[in-house]
């Protein structure tokens, strides 16, 4: 370990295989996991615990299926901030995103786009209201919002 961080060189082929299998099925039994990585159950369990202790495995989660039909629209937004403004506009926008009930997910990204946002709105009128609110707020300093409707989740 280097300063509490895991060095990728400390993981061997079996550790990588364990991580690959657990990423696909975090609820797999130690016996089935051991079979897939060519170990017996006990050493496999010890490796998983070591990976957890080192912080390589940080937790397990359930992937929840969404109902086939939910009311409203899912919109994917690209937000470009006015780069001439100071960084306080980014912080103000992030606070607004964190509190807004229509924001499903939001990511600060690099490149020409500043934010990707996944928004759930009951209709386009609700979306327009949100956009108008954000664009008219001088503290946010938003230059442009580009919107695309989510048609189908592929993965």
Image (cartoon, rainbow, N blue to C red):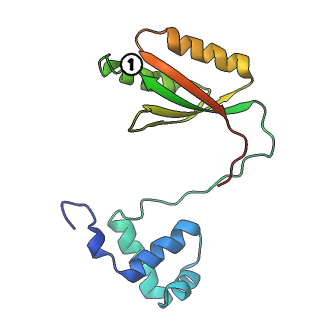
Q: Residue at (71%, 52%) from the top-left corner? A: 65
Where in the figure is residue 89, as x and y percent of width and height?
37, 18
Element under disc 1: loop
Residue 112, x across and y down, in percent = 41, 33
Q: Nearer the viewer, residue 74 or 63?
A: 74
Label 1 Cα crowd, 10 Å radius (few <14 / some 14-19 / many 20+): some
Q: Give the side of residue 137 with respect to residue 132, left or right.
A: left
Rendering coords of residue 149 (x, y %)? 68, 33
The quadrant in which the C terminus is found is: bottom right
Residue 148's place in the image compared with 33, above or below, is above
Examine the rendered structure and indicate whether residue 24 appears above or below residue 140. Answer: below
Question: Camera-side residue: 150 or 31?
Answer: 150
- Residue labelled with disc 1: 82
Q: Image quadrant of residue 25?
A: bottom right
How many dots with numbers? 1
Q: Residue furthest front?
A: 112
Q: Quadrant of residue 121?
A: top right
Q: Vertical placement of 13 versus 1: above or below?
A: below
Q: Is residue 46 visible?
A: no
Which of 1 and 149 lies nearest the eye of the viewer? 149
Q: Residue at x 56, y 26 (%)?
A: 146
**x 22%, y 68%: residue:** 1
Q: Residue at x 62, y 27 (%)?
A: 102
Q: Is residue 6 shown left or right of residue 36?
A: left
Give residue 113's position: percent from left, percent from top: 44, 32
């Amino acid at each position: 370990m280097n300063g509490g961080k895991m060095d990728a060189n400390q993981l061997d082929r079996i550790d990588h295989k364990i991580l690959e299998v657990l990423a696909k099925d975090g609820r797999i039994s130690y016996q089935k996991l051991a079979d897939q990585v060519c170990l017996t159950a006990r050493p496999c369990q010890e490796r998983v615990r070591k990976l957890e202790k080192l912080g390589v495995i940080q937790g397990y989660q359930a992937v929840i299926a969404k109902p086939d039909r939910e009311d409203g629209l899912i919109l994917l937004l690209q937000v470009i901030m006015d780069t001439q403004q100071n960084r306080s506009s980014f912080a103000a926008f992030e606070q607004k995103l964190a509190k807004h009930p229509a924001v499903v997910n939001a990511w600060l990204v690099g490149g020409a786009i500043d934010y990707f946002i996944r928004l759930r709105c009951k209709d386009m009128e609700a979306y327009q209201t949100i956009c108008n609110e954000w664009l008219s707020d001088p503290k946010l300093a938003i230059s442009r919002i580009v919107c695309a409707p989510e048609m189908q989740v592929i993965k």
